[in-house]
Amino acid sequence: MTKKKGILFWITGLSGSGKTTLAKKLFPYVLKNCGPSIHLDGDTLRKILDLHGYSFKDRIANSEKFTKIAKFLTDQGINVVFSLVGLMDKPRNWNRKNIKKYIEIYIKSDVKKIISKNKKKIYKKNKNIVGVNIKPQFPKKPDIIIENTFSKNLGNLDRELRSKVSKLLKKKKYGK
C-alpha cells in the first residue's frame, strides 16, 4: 500500500518579516484541511540540532539538513509548515525536485521597514543578517507571495494567506 505523501509549506522571508507568526496562524488550517501536520521553524531546529553558524555557508548547510527533515516527514504522510529565513536558491530548488507536494510561500517585506520595527532586536544582535550583510537569494517563482508592509493587521495577512493556500490546494488537488 502506498502511503499518501504530506505537503511541505516552505515559508521563507527576511528575519522579522512575520514568517513564524503567519506559520503559526496557518498551522490549524493545514491540520484541519490536510490531515496530520507539524509546524517547524528554523530557530527552534537550530536549538534542537545545536546549530550555531550564521554565515552564508552555515545557512546553506543548515537548510540542507532542514530540507531532509521535511522530506522525511512528508514521506511519512505528515504535512510540514516550515518557517525559516531560507533565502537561498539551493535548498528551495532541492525541495522542488525532491518533495512531491511542495508549496513555497514568500513573505515579502522591505528590510528597512523591518529594521525600523525590529521588535526582536535581530538586526543588532548578529553581523550575518540575510538582507543586510548576506545577500539574499529571493524566490524567483514562489507559489504564494504575501506582502507584509506592516500596514495590514495580522488578521488580514492571515486571511490572505489562508485564502491563497486554499485556492492552491484545490488547484493542485492536495487536500484531504
Image: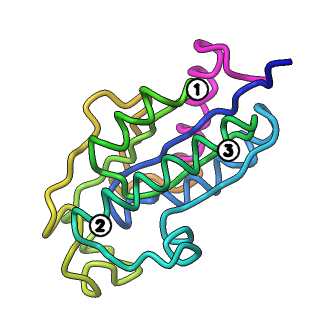
- Determine crowd level at label 2: few under 14, some 14-19, many 20+ residues with C-alpha closer than 10 A: few
Q: Which of 33 and 51 lies nearest the eye of the viewer?
A: 51
Provide the residue designation for mark 3: 73
Q: Which residues are magenta?
A: 157-176
**Residue 36: image location, x then y, percent:** 81, 42
Classified by dominant secondary structure, the portion drawn in magenta counts as helix
- Determine crowd level at label 3: few under 14, some 14-19, many 20+ residues with C-alpha closer than 10 A: some
Q: Which residue is rendered at x = 54% and y = 73% of the image?
A: 49
**Residue 86: image location, x then y, percent:** 36, 53
Q: Which residue is rendered at x = 31% and y = 56% of the image?
A: 60
| Residue 113 located left or right of residue 81 | left
The amino acid type of the residue labelled 1 equals Lys
Q: Which of 134 and 149 lies nearest the eye of the viewer?
A: 134
Provide the residue designation for mark 2: 58
Q: Nearer the observer, disc 2 or disc 1?
A: 2
- Specify the label residue 101 is tagged with: 1
Q: Tag 1, which secondary structure?
A: loop
Q: Quadrant of the N terminus?
A: top right
Instruction: Say which label, 2 or 1, has the lower sequence index.
Output: 2
Q: Tag 2, which secondary structure?
A: helix
Does the CB distance between marks 2 and 3 fall below 8 Å?
no
Could you tell me how far apart the alpha carbons at marks 2 and 3 are, in whole angstroms? Answer: 23 Å
